[in-house]
């Protein structure tokens, strides 16, 4: 095994912690919004209404997603390009990049699409991709660490 194949593509600690923290906040705000949107209604003056926490959660989700996109730019410079050139863990990493790109594009679509039908389809695809990305990241990290620990 060549030396560069065992090279670690670890990012600076503060970037890693920021990505984990902001990513977790993004995932949790999205999941809680989904739960409130689909399962919680409050009794209003004129009948059932959405939870008053839906809008603040959606705003938080959007702000945190913007921060996550910025952090992904840092990740691209310090981690993704180097690992991609070395073909290390590139399949799971490439899938992660595709998921994050879809989440960014579909998030903008949810904000700007005018058609209710398109918003409905985009919304389902967005939250499915978000759940998959949240579950995929630990797998990607585990595979990368395992590849470094394997004997030559």
Image (cartoon, helix red, strand yellow):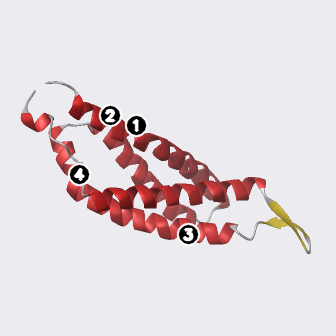
Q: Is residue 112 among what the camera can see?
A: no
From the image, tell me which residue sits under label 1.
139
- Displayed quadrant of residue 49: bottom right
* Mark 1 neighbour class, 10 Å CA radius: few under 14, some 14 to 19, many 20 or more: some
Q: Earlier in the sequence, mark 4 or mark 2?
A: 4
Gap between marks 3 and 4, in whole Å?
Answer: 27 Å
Q: Residue shown at 53%/55% (left/top)? A: 27
Relative to 145, residue 48 above or below: below
Check disc 1 and report its element: helix, strand or loop.
helix
Q: Residue shown at 76%/66% (left/top)? A: 51
Residue 145 location in percent, x, y? 28, 37
Check disc 4 and report its element: helix, strand or loop.
helix
Q: Are marks 4 and 2 in contact (CB under 8 Å)?
A: no
Residue 47 location in percent, x, y? 91, 67
Residue 60 disc label: 3
* Mark 3 neighbour class, 10 Å CA radius: few under 14, some 14 to 19, many 20 or more: some
Check disc 3 and report its element: helix, strand or loop.
helix
Relative to 68, residue 59 above or below: below
- Viewed as shown, does residue 151 lie left or right of 146? left
Residue 59 location in percent, x, y? 58, 71
Q: Is residue 121 among what the camera can see?
A: yes
Gap between marks 1 and 2, in whole Å?
Answer: 6 Å
Gap between marks 4 and 2, in whole Å?
Answer: 15 Å
Q: Residue shown at 54%/46% (left/top)? A: 131
Q: Are marks 1 and 2 in contact (CB under 8 Å)?
A: yes
Residue 143 disc label: 2
């Amino acid at each position: 095994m060549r030396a560069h194949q065992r090279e670690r593509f670890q990012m600076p600690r503060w970037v890693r912690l920021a990505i984990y923290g902001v990513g977790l906040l993004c995932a949790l705000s999205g999941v809680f919004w989904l739960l409130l949107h689909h399962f919680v209604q409050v009794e209003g003056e004129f009948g059932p209404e959405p939870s008053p926490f839906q809008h603040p959660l959606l705003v938080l989700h959007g702000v945190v997603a913007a921060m996550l996109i910025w952090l992904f730019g840092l990740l691209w410079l310090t981690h993704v390009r180097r690992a991609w050139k070395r073909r290390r863990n590139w399949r799971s990493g490439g899938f992660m990049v595709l998921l994050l790109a879809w989440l960014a594009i579909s998030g903008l679509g949810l904000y700007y699409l005018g058609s209710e039908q398109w918003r409905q389809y985009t919304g389902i695809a967005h939250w499915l991709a978000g759940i998959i990305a949240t579950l995929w990241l630990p797998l990607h990290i585990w595979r990368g660490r395992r590849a470094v620990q394997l004997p030559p």
